[in-house]
Amino acid sequence: MKLQPHQLTYIAEDLGKRRPAPIGWLLLLAQHRSEVVREGAIYGLAMHRDRMDVGKRLERMAIEDASDCIRIAAIEALEP
């Protein structure tokens, strides 16, 4: 069964709520080709923005992502 982007985005958000969160999976989803999946990954990662690897990924997305919406979401995720 192949998961669709709209399913992956909800999964990514939910993964961020888990303790311990599977940060590696979220970082991979943050690189997904689908904008909606990257957005879900941002919401999952936002709960862990104080981790260096997560903060760096969010900063990179805020600057480099091709989508305006993703850049804005990443900027918002970095805010306390």
Image (tube, helix red, strand yellow):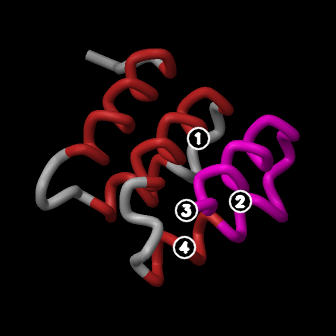
Q: How many labels does the image show?
A: 4
Q: In which quarter of the image is residue 64?
A: bottom right
Q: Which residue lies furthest to the bottom in this view?
A: 52
Q: Tell me which label, 4 or 2, sits earlier in the chain.
A: 4
The CA span between labels 4 and 2 is 10 Å
**Residue hosting label 3:** 80
Q: Tell me which label, 4 or 1, sits earlier in the chain.
A: 1
Q: Which residue is drawn at 63% across and 31% down?
A: 34
**Do callouts 2 and 1 mark residues in contact (Cβ within 8 Å)?**
yes
**Residue hosting label 4:** 55
Residue type for callout 1: Arg
Q: What SS does tag 3 mark?
A: loop
Q: Tell me which label, 1 or 3, sits earlier in the chain.
A: 1
Q: What SS does tag 2 mark?
A: helix
Q: Tell me which label, 3 or 2, sits earlier in the chain.
A: 2
Marks 4, 1: nearer the viewer: 4
Residue 20: where, in percent of width, then height? 13, 61
Over which residues does the magenta segment extend? 59-80
Provide the major secondary structure of the magenta segment. helix
**Do callouts 4 and 2 mark residues in contact (Cβ within 8 Å)?**
no
Q: What SS does tag 1 mark?
A: helix
Neighbor class of circle 1 (other Cα within 10 Å; few <14, some 14-19, many 20+) is many
Q: Residue 38 carries which label?
A: 1
The CA span between labels 2 and 1 is 9 Å
Q: Which of 25 and 40 is in front in this view?
A: 40
The CA span between labels 4 and 1 is 15 Å
**Residue hosting label 2:** 61
Residue 72 colored in magenta in the image:
yes
The CA span between labels 3 and 4 is 12 Å
The CA span between labels 1 and 3 is 20 Å
Q: Which residue is drawn at 37% across and 63% down?
A: 48
